[in-house]
Amino acid sequence: MVGIIMGSISDLKVMQGAVDILEKFQVKYEIEIVSAHRTPEKMVAYASEAEGRGLKAIIAGAGGAAHLPGMVASCTILPVIGVPVKSSNSIDGWDSVLSILQMPNGVPVATVALNASMNAGLLAIQIMSTADTDLRKKLHDYKEELKEKVNQMNVELNSAK
């Protein structure tokens, strides 16, 4: 199971990509609003209890100062995947990207592109697939689907001539 957390309900629009890809792969998930700044006790409890609840990875989306992924990573041994969110008070999203990307040694956070929660979901699936042959098969099938989409685009491109 994967935990999906975000600092505010306004982040859900971005984080929906992670939900959608986990559902496509039939991976169980939980989703919560957990603010590093407004509910720090909840954040610490969520992160420190995640392993015991059976989570295998945590996807944490945050905008602005974007402390949520790093602070969560400091409280758990689970892999944390940070999703920088371009929020309404953001500096073109760079504040979020750099806040999540610049973690000190010893507290790693995998960081995907700005607003790229689908990639965060895929990365969580890839991590879990190392111990799950069914997920590995689904990932191989997914990669074939991507190839087919490109092949179909070429067919459409060349038929338009």
Image (cartoon, helix red, strand yellow):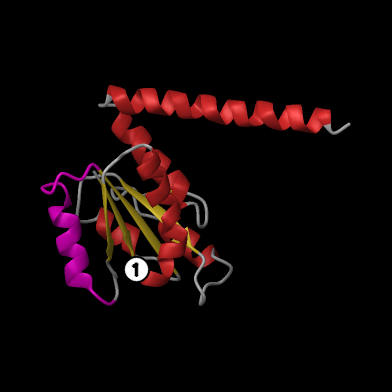
Q: In which quarter of the image is residue 99?
A: bottom left
On the question of residue 98 being in view, the answer is no
Q: Which residue is drawn at 46% across and 44% down?
A: 119
User: What amino acid is found at the position of numbered circle 1 in the picture?
Assistant: Gly
Residue 46: within the magenta?
yes
- Between 160 and 7, the one lying in front of the other is 160
Most foreground residue, 135 or 37: 135
Q: x, y percentage for residue 96?
A: 47, 64
- In this view, 110 is above or below 152: below
Q: Residues within 10 Å of mark 1 (few under 14, many from 20)?
A: many
Name the residue that disc number 1 marks: 7
Q: Residue at x 23, y 45 (%)?
A: 78
In the image, residue 124 above or below residue 70:
above
Residue 48 lies in the magenta-colored region: yes
Q: Residue 57: where, in percent of width, then height?
A: 27, 45
Above/below status of 95 relative to 69: below
Compared across the picture, whether 42 is left or right of 85 comes to: left
Instruction: State the quadrant of the C terminus.
Output: top right
Residue located at (36% from left, 71% from top):
8
Residue 61 visible from this viewpoint = yes
**Quadrant occupied by the N terminus:** top left
Please give the name of the residue rendered at 36% of the width and 44% of the height, measured from the top-left corner.
Answer: 23
Give the quarter of the image for residue 127: top left
- Direction from residue 108 to residue 84 in the image, left or right: right
Q: Magenta span covers which residues?
A: 38-56
